[in-house]
Amino acid sequence: MKTLKKIVLVGAIAAMCTSCYVQTHVVGSGAKGNTEVKSWNHYLLYGLAPVGVSQPEEMANGAKDYTVTTKHSFVNGLINSLTFGIYSPTTTIVKY
């Protein structure tokens, strides 16, 4: 019984220590305005096989200075868990 409690405790601590994946890239001097463009990236098999990936250069609409953020949002994580990792989307946000 003590072993089961330890396993549950370790599992709970591990679940609480997870976080969302966020990656930010600054191009040029970074975003100058408040315009944001969002797009989903589509991956299969836990993100190993890209199916459709957004192009930040095109999303910036020709701007020289912009900021690109790629993350797993709550909805992305929910869809990932519902499909057991077969489909793993991410969200790209370009601010310029």
Image: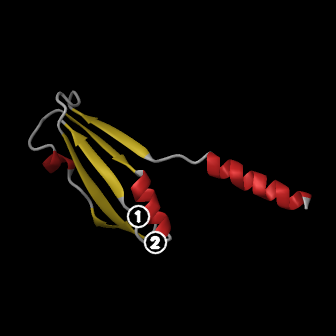
Quadrant of res 61: top left
Q: Are marks 1 and 2 in contact (CB under 8 Å)?
A: yes
Tally of numbered discs: 2
Q: On residue 83, which mark appears? A: 2
Residue 31, percent across and down? 21, 31
Which amino acid type corresponds to the residue marked 2 in the rendered image? Answer: Thr
Q: Can you say whether 81 is above or below 32 in the image?
A: below
Residue 41, percent across and down? 30, 59
Q: On residue 70, which mark appears? A: none
Q: On residue 88, which mark appears? A: 1
Q: Residue at x 13, y 50 (%)?
A: 58
Quadrant of res 53: bottom left
Secondary element at image label 2: loop
Which amino acid type corresponds to the residue marked 1 in the rendered image? Answer: Ser
Q: Is residue 93 left or right of residue 74?
A: left
Q: Residue at x 45, y 47 (%)?
A: 21
Distance of mark 1 from mark 2, alpha carbons? Answer: 8 Å
Q: Can you say whether 42 is above or below 64 in the image?
A: below
Quadrant of res 80: bottom left
Residue 25, percent across and down? 31, 38
Looking at the figure, which quarter contains the N terminus?
bottom right
Secondary element at image label 1: loop
Q: Residue at x 27, y 45 (%)?
A: 93
Mark 1 vs mark 2: in front:
2
Foreground: 52 or 33?
A: 33
